[in-house]
Image: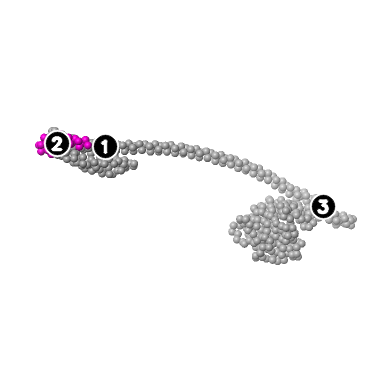
Amino acid sequence: ASVEERARVRLVSIQLETLLVMALDAETGQRGFLLTEDENYLQPYLLAVAKLKPQVELLVAAEHGQHSVQIQAETLRPLVEKKVAELTTSVHLAKNKDSSAAKALVQTHEGKLLMDEIRSQIESKKQQIAQYRANYDQQYIRQLTQMRWAMIVGNILTLGLLAWAFSYLHQEVKKRTEAESAIKSLNQELHDQVAELDSVNKELEAFSYSVSHDLRAPLRHINGFVDLLQNNGTEKLGEKSSRYLGIIADSARQMGRLIDDLLVFSRMSRTELKRNMIGLDDVVRQAISDLQSEIKDRPIVWKKHPLPTVLADRSLMYQVYFNLIANAVKYSRNRHPAEIEIGWRQGEENEVVCFVRDNGVGFDMQYAKKLFGVFQRLHRAEDFEGTGIGLANVRRIITRHGGKTWGEGKLDGGATFYFSLPMVPEQKTQSVPSHDHAPLKNLKESHAPA
């Protein structure tokens, strides 16, 4: 029950008490007047009689205003009306000096019986209200007990949750501490490795200096004495000795080229990258122009597709294309005509794949892993000159740009060399297919380099 409902029930109880007090006041005033004929007793009597019937109506209205206890207050209405009539009749007789008739009416005990019935019903109804209030109190106590237990359980759960949260946070802090310790350890290892790598680089620089200076001096001596012998002593040397001198001179020159290429390769990893937006078309055009001495009078069909703009070091990308195009020119020298294709296609997400393809002697794919190694050659030096450094330089340059290199070929069926570079976000250039026999768009063909 709500607080308002309890207040209404309490109002019914108060109205019952008030009704009983009024009935007693009326009866007391009546008896006092009848015994003493003193009209001073009539004042409380008159006040009580005037209010009894309205009080019954207030009680009925109060009962109708609540729904928790039904005491049937209407049953008191006829009793109160009879009691008022009995009181009024006896007082009227006494006021008219007919005391004997008034006393005779009182001695019939009708008034007493009515008062006893009124008192009995009021007490019964009060007990109903008391029982309701007792039940309400018990229910309230039960609810209060349940609330207390709920609070206790809630507090226990809260404490458990706090304990779990503390344990979880403790574990997380422990994990974080361990992770930070591991990171510090890894950073220290990385620092040690960087220091070791720096030491190795310094050793490589010292080696490069030694190669550049110490090894060149013996080569210069060999070349010098070979020249002296060839220029001044050929009449004293036989044909066989002259041939030996030629072999020595060629080997010394080859040794010099190896030293030069090795120095270039060692410097490649230390050269600072100067990234700019560059057009690969201009780079290819310059590389082909610088190879004019090797391709003049050669029947070469050039298939050059428009190339993209990339973010890269221009001088290093020139080295890439110079090496790849020079290899294509060299290994297709026995083809009439030679065909060299230069293009690109979109690779995986956010990358472009450029390629240089030729119809030269090709290679066996089982040896493809050796292509980009230092001093690795798949053809005899007697057939094709070179030091085996060019493709190693290509791989090192592309790796520094964040790309990859690979090759595909077939013996006597040509070769294609690929490299990938990160794609410029706003790049819109249309790529072309890179597979054999693909339809070519925007194709430029000529028998001389552009």
Judged from the image, the secondary structure of the residue bearing numbered disc 2 is helix
* Left or right of residue 45: residue 434: right
Residue at the spot of label 1: 124
Mark 1 vs mark 2, CA separation in Å: 28 Å
Among the two numbered marks 2 and 3 on one chain, the one whose residue lies closer to the N terminus: 2
Q: State the predominant SS element of the stretch in magenta.
A: helix
Q: Amino acid at mark 3?
A: Ile
**Can you tell which of label 1 and label 3 is closer to the viewer?**
1
Residue 30 magenta-drawn? no
Mark 1 vs mark 3, CA separation in Å: 140 Å
Judged from the image, the secondary structure of the residue bearing numbered disc 1 is helix
Most foreground residue, 312 or 441:
441
Among the two numbered marks 1 and 2 on one chain, the one whose residue lies closer to the N terminus: 2
The residue shown at (21%, 38%) is 22
Residue at the spot of label 3: 222
Mark 2 vs mark 3, CA separation in Å: 167 Å
In the rendered view of the protein, which quadrant contains the C terminus?
A: bottom right
Residue 390 image point, x, y percent: 72, 55
Q: Amino acid at mark 2?
A: Leu
Residue range highlighted in magenta? 90-117
Residue 290 image point, x, y percent: 72, 61
In contact (CB < 8 Å): disc 2 and disc 3: no
In the rendered view of the protein, which quadrant contains the N terminus?
A: top left
